Amino acid sequence: MFKVDVRGQEWAIKAMNCPGAMLLFGSRPRSYKELPMRLAEPSPLHRDELPGTLHGLLRVRIVTQDDAHIFCTEEQIQDEIRAVVAYARYLYELFGMTASAELATRPDNKLGTDEQWDRTEAALKTALELNEIPHTIAVGEGAFYGPKIDLHMEDALGRKWQMGTIQLDSQMPSRFGLKYTGPDNQEHDLYVVHRALYGSFERFIGILIEHYGGAFPFWLAPVQIRFVPVSDDHAERAEAVAVRIREAGYRVEVDSSDETVGKRIRNAQVEKIPFTVVFGERESKESLAVRARGGEQSNPSLAELLETLASLRDEAG
């Protein structure tokens, strides 16, 4: 907890989203017809990490977590966890990344009975097996309120970092007094699936940068095309063509700085921008001097360049 003193009273800055989700669910009576109820809350959270453990984007004190809480019945657990695991796989594959799975089981300071933990651990293990996901067991590494599936990725030095997590919990709903009304008109206990698939946007971006070595695929690159006018006389025409590409939905810059043409081209290569367009006297909408990040050079028309960009964008699905 990140604790601060405010006029002699100790406060803790928000460290987790879970209590808010519990209070929202419990704000009025709930029927089985409303379940599963899926609540998402990407939110900044605060952790009092020791100064010596801070590590760039990979370990910070303020994290933005893509959090969600899925309230469901015991019968719905498998379908919900299976859907979350499948979505995690889809999400990572979108970036060309893979994660290793770890099933973390009951810790010594657990809440609840062994029978409850037997059910929740078995549900997570079954979800991994049904999705044919290889995994290891981390004995005693679960959260105090429930077991979890932790998804790990490696950085450029081969160090493992926890990214996503999928947790199954029957304790927190119980401690908040949460129930749902079943078809028998009686109150029943419910379960919560806690899930964060990026884990934190900061850490995911850090791993993503290392994964691509800064050479992001075209659809993800912050700047997709950079125009380099040969001189100030060509800057206005270069901007006019860049506007056409920008209007088509692409991220375009025009570098009209005072540096030499060679230096500006070199800057674009160092920044690993997918395409650099050198724009001089002979360039026009009918013929552009295009340099791809890999070094290939071509002279497409503006229409042909837009076709190439569209195909690259479509590769991301």
Image (cartoon, grey):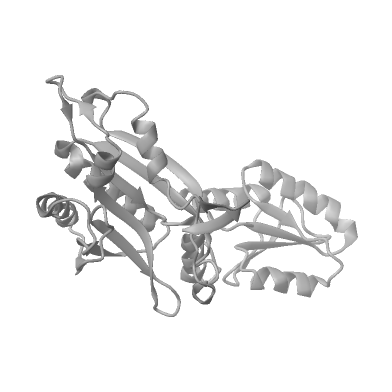
> Is residue 317 something one can see in this rendering?
no
Q: Give coordinates of residue 53: x percent, y percent.
A: 49, 74
For this view, does 68 lie left or right of residue 251?
A: left
Q: Give coordinates of residue 252: x percent, y percent.
A: 68, 53
Q: Residue furthest front?
A: 8
> Is residue 183 something one can see in this rendering?
yes
Choose top left, top right, bottom left or bottom right for residue 244: top right
Question: In front here: 227 or 271?
Answer: 271
Choose top left, top right, bottom left or bottom right for residue 158: bottom left
Q: Residue furthest bottom?
A: 157
Question: In front here: 96 or 175?
Answer: 175
Q: Give coordinates of residue 197: x percent, y percent.
A: 37, 53
Tally of numbered tags: 0
Which residue is at a point 73% across and 70% down the rendered structure image? 265
Q: Give coordinates of residue 205: x percent, y percent.
A: 51, 61
Which residue is at a point 39% across and 32% down the rendered structure image? 24
